[in-house]
Amino acid sequence: MSTKSRTYHDPVHGGIHLRGDDPVDQLLIQLIDTPEFQRLRRIRQLDLASLTFHGAEGSRFTHALGVLAVARRVWDHLCIQHPELAAYRALMLTAALLHDVGHGPFSHAGEEVFGFDHEAWTCRIIGEQTQITQLLNGYQAGLADQLVHVFQGKAAHPLVGQLVSGQLDCDRLDYLLRDSYFTGTQYGHLDLDRIITALAYDPQTQSLVVRGRKGLVAVEHYLVVRYFMYTQVYNHPKNLAARFVLTGILHRAKECFEQGGLAVDETLAEWLGSPAANWSLSTYLAADDVVIGYHLQRWQQATDLVLANLCRQLVNRNLPKFLEITDLGAAQQQRLLERLYGTAEPGQAPYTVGIKTTRIKGYSLYDKGIYLQSEAQEPPKEIADCSPLVRALVLTSPKVWLIYPRVWSEQVQHLVAIASTMAGLGTVDHV
């Protein structure tokens, strides 16, 4: 069956052109048109970050197409020197396109709140009898199973797995550029052209490598960019405050639902009434940001005043305050939380005040690291062994944030000042 060519005009990568006369591109077009993939239009890439960065409205759909665009450029570049890789082109490009098809409402925030793993759902969507499964196996028998193996870390070719989920993968290259663009920040600007030019394939190890001094510099820049995007965007404390409120909403909603006092549709009845492990695939796919957002709007008038107030906070962006308390010891942090719990209305403390911990994702030393090959005949070396800058990004420290109501600002600052003074004196007996 012939398919017309198609071009997606992407704000980050320009025109993403899929040819109707190319069998792999034809498959990609058909996959994009499935209900399972179109659902990604209704899931925001940066969950609640639009409450902090007003332009962060991009969807998982746009990100998936961006990863496909990057993967195509990288794979075609590598195939020039290693034509034998061309046999894995369909696997590589479909993996790039479908890597996030299992994301749920509010992306990573939804995972945190509901306790599910989007990668596991990606495998179910591809492995069970969906339109995506039928198209994959219709193109090549067993292709759906091969993709599941990729997402489980058992790719038929190691290079495919590295480019889908590794320290220098196509997913990260796109989301750093894309998220920087949509948040209006400057931290995510990286030299994609130079990075791709520096990428090479080492047949002996079947691994992705970076070539030359210029390649090292480009990757150093990429890792610094990633570090700053985490510190300034992904782990922005206002994002944490928004997630804290969303968590409170859904926990409270679950309590109200179990007591029989909350109106929900059939989809959310399943989400609130049973653990994620028991959901059917159709139940999971029926939920998105629109479905959850509809309920948040309705629950502003809920009879449960705690739930109604939390929903109004999130919908109207009247978010709680935040204060870093990293310098306080764990015991002092807990004492401070307990003291503030006593200030809250009876039964409302968990929805009023809390502590959130973030850790910057720097560079991890593990088997999917980045390897540098200075000369073609030399064995690749772990990039951290070649760069003092990269070594500095290996060790990162967590940050601890106190989330609390705006009206408590004066009280909280007073208590934290006392705790900080005690910490300086080496005392933890009082807050």
Image (tube, grey):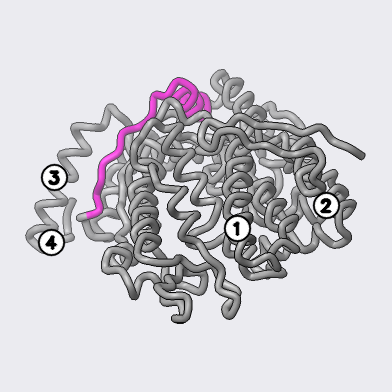
Residue type indicated by callout 2 = Leu
Mark 4 against mark 2, which lies toward the viewer? 2
Distance in Å between CA atoms under marks 1 and 4 = 49 Å
Location of mark 4 (residue): 427
Task: Indicate the quadrant where residue 258 lies.
Answer: top right
Mark 1 against mark 4, which lies toward the viewer? 1
Location of mark 3 (residue): 417
Mark 3 against mark 4, which lies toward the viewer? 3
Residue 386 relative to residue 24: left or right:
left
Distance in Å between CA atoms under marks 2 and 3 = 60 Å
Location of mark 2 (residue): 136
Residue type indicated by callout 3 = Ala
Mark 3 against mark 1, which lies toward the viewer? 1
Task: Indicate the quadrant where residue 13 lies.
Answer: top right
Residue type indicated by callout 4 = Thr
Residue 306 in the image, given as x and y percentages of width and height: 48, 29
Q: Secondary structure at mark 1?
A: helix
Mark 2 against mark 3, which lies toward the viewer? 2
Observer able to see residue 204 = yes
Distance in Å between CA atoms under marks 4 and 2 = 63 Å
> What are the residue bounds of the magenta stretch?
307-326
Which is more N-terminal, label 3 or label 2? 2
Location of mark 1 (residue): 164
| Mark number displayed over residue 236 | none
Residue type indicated by callout 1 = Val
| Few, some or many residues within 10 Å of mark 1 (<14, 14–19, 20+) | many
